[in-house]
Amino acid sequence: MRFTAVASLSFLVGLLTTGAVSLSLPSAESSASNVPFTLRYVPGFFKQGTASIDRPTANPDHFGLLTNVSWSDVDIYIDMQAARGVQAKLFLFLRHGQGIHNVAEAQYGTETWERYYRKLGKYTDARLTALGIQQVVNASDRIDTELENGLRIEGVVVSPLERTLHTSMIAYRHHDEIPKHSMEWPRETIGICTCDLRGTISSKAVQYPSIDFDDFWSDADPWWSPNKRESELHIDDRARIFLNRVFYGHKSTHMGVVTHGGLTNAAMRVIGHR
């Protein structure tokens, strides 16, 4: 499954484990990466990653669990792998709700947006629209339902952009017991678009006091450039670094990730997800 630059909010679930080699990219591109990476997608649990069936819609029932699979089956697999000395972790990816930049691109068209509007200051660190907020409220209801059905989420990692921080607060609004941790790595594709220029961490820490921002090394955005857009190879490497840090650096085995379409697409490429 791939996400496009539409205004809809989307879920995608992946079960990851360690492997001998990266299954992510064709050899010509893999050889250009210097990021050690051995995580791979585990098939057999979710429709999105099962090649023998048609790809489901962006938001399938039960987040895409196969009809003969339960959340308990996922937990059993993770526990069995742990007993063998092999790590496996569940990642629930959630794309943010509609932002003001999504509305602008739809209104002006992609060509005009990329030529002019995406560079305007009024879209800096784009916020959610009223529709985007309602989309996340609906997503929150779905998360609540699956948690009641046996889904476990032990921690949430969130991009530091305004639209993802706000999304995380609404999506998990009934679950204050689940800690939220922000990181620089799961941001949207970086550069040129002001919507992807983040505000200061000091201001975000005041606005979102329940989110942990201790991972950041720069108050201002250290990566965004008004003249250069991040390449696919670079965002793929950033996705590798992000997944490595969460997979190996967090004790939790069931993680929520609130992020963007570009980063989610990159993560799916590098783990070998269709």
Image (cartoon, rainbow, N blue to C red):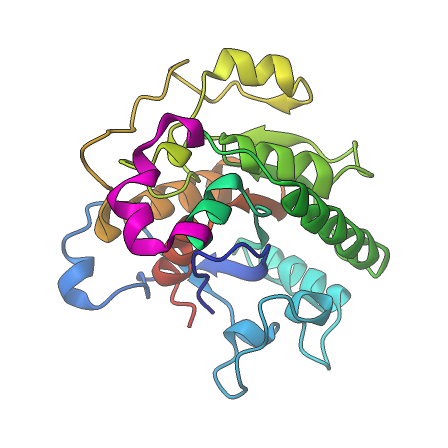
Residue 204, placed above or below residue 241? above
The residues colored magenta run 107-124
The quadrant in which residue 109 appears is bottom left
Q: Is residue 138 left or right of residue 2?
A: right
Residue 190 in sight: no
Expressed as whole percent of the image width and height from the top left, the position of residue 3 reads 46, 61
Q: Is residue 109 magenta?
A: yes
10 inside magenta stretch: no
Instruction: Please determine whether, in this image, residue 131 is positioned above or below residue 202.
Output: below
* Residue in view at x 22 percent, y 48 percent: 231
**Picture layout, residue 50 above or below residue 106:** below
Q: Quadrant of residue 106?
A: bottom left
Q: Is residue 175 visible?
A: yes
Q: Nearer the viewer, residue 24 or 60?
A: 60
Q: Residue at x 49, y 31 (%)?
A: 161
* Residue drawn at point x = 47 percent, y = 30 percent: 183
138 lies above or below 178: below
For the C terminus, the quadrant is bottom left
Q: Is residue 234 left or right of residue 6?
A: left
Residue located 47% across and 83% down the image:
51
Given residues 17 and 203, the one toward you in this image is 203
Number of labels in the image equals 0
- Measured as percent of width and height from the top left, residue 160 is found at 50, 30
Chief secondary structure of the magenta portion: helix
- View extreme (right): residue: 148
Residue 80: image location, x then y, percent: 64, 63
Q: Position of residue 54 (x, y in %)?
A: 53, 85
- Which residue is outermost to the front? 108
